[in-house]
Amino acid sequence: MPIQSAEAIILRHLDYGEADRIVTFLTPEHGVKKGFARSARNSRKRFGAALEPYASVRMHWRARGGELLTLREAELLDLRAGLRADLAALALAAYGCELTEELFWEAHGHREVFALLAAYLDHLASAGGEASARLLLELRLLNLAGYVPHLLHCSECNVTLTPGGAAFAAGRGGSLCRSCAGSGPARTVALGTLGSLARSLLTPPTAFAGFRFSPQTLGEGSALLAEALRLHLHRPLRTLAFLNEVLPPPAA
């Protein structure tokens, strides 16, 4: 089989045996891939630090007849060393990579997802851990996956929402008007929060700097997106408990 190569973001790795590693990485052309790096922990020439999580690399591999690729070499493009200086940023990076893998685990290309995750990690490496970065990533990943909930219109009757009467239930499609909210479980939410989320979807998806959400928007928005994510994820994320310990979710 011919050797293939692509730019990649290292999502995670697992040490195997005495010197090998199994590496999960994201590429724009091929989506999420897994590869076996023989003697990775002993080979400075072929891999060095290029298999560290959250790094951008040029990955070279050969297919081996199954899901697991044979990794030949990885050229380091950006280690994003700034992440290691901020525990909150490191926790957000781990969470963002796991969330991306879970929502886009199928092996096909998605350039917008790759660009979004790269921009998110770059922002964390330079600006540190920010709750707004998590909210933006969750919202944009849900949008790219086709799971973003209704925000400014009632998900059941499609009426435009008005101040004082908005509610939300992810299992019912998202936002609800006062009349529809009473027919089932739903949480109240400020229309300003829903408006802020909707406006955020109109901004460039790789922009993270300069966003200033109110405490109410951060708290309510984080709770709404967490509810929407639980609906679509196949399992609880391993990184979430650590993230919530390091950077507790804003109060709703």
Image (cartoon, helix red, strand yellow):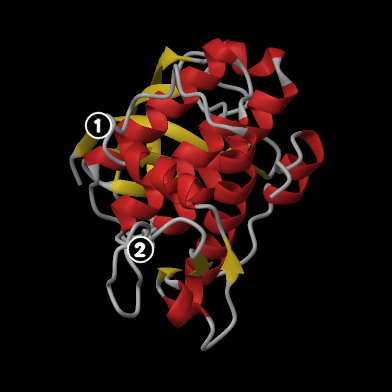
What is the quadrant of residue 247 in the picture?
Answer: top right
In which image quadrant can residue 226 be found? bottom right
Frontmost residue, 184 versus 46:
184
Q: Is residue 148 above or below residue 97?
A: below
Three-letter code for the amino acid on which mark 2 is drawn: His
Residue 116 rendering spot, x and y as whole percentages? 35, 34
Side of 108 relative to 15 (left or right): left
Check the image and report above or below for 189 versus 77: below
Spatial separation of the CA atoms under disc 2 and disc 1: 39 Å
Regarding residue 250, the answer to whether it shows in the image is yes
Q: Answer whether labels 2 and 1 touch (C-beta < 8 Å).
A: no
Q: Of the numbered discs in the image, which one, if any, rests on residue 249?
A: none
What's the residue type where badge 1 is placed?
Ser
What residue is pinned by disc 2?
150
Q: Is residue 230 above or below residue 104?
A: below
> What is the crowding at mark 2: few (fewer than 14 residues within 10 Å), some, or many (at least 20)?
many
| Residue 38 in sight from this viewpoint | no
Q: Position of residue 54 (x, y in %)?
A: 52, 28
- Judging by the rendered image, the residue that carries numbered circle 1 is 5
Task: Determine whether the residue tagged by mark 2 lies in a helix, strand or loop.
Answer: loop
Pinpoint residue 45: horizontal percent, then vertical percent: 47, 13
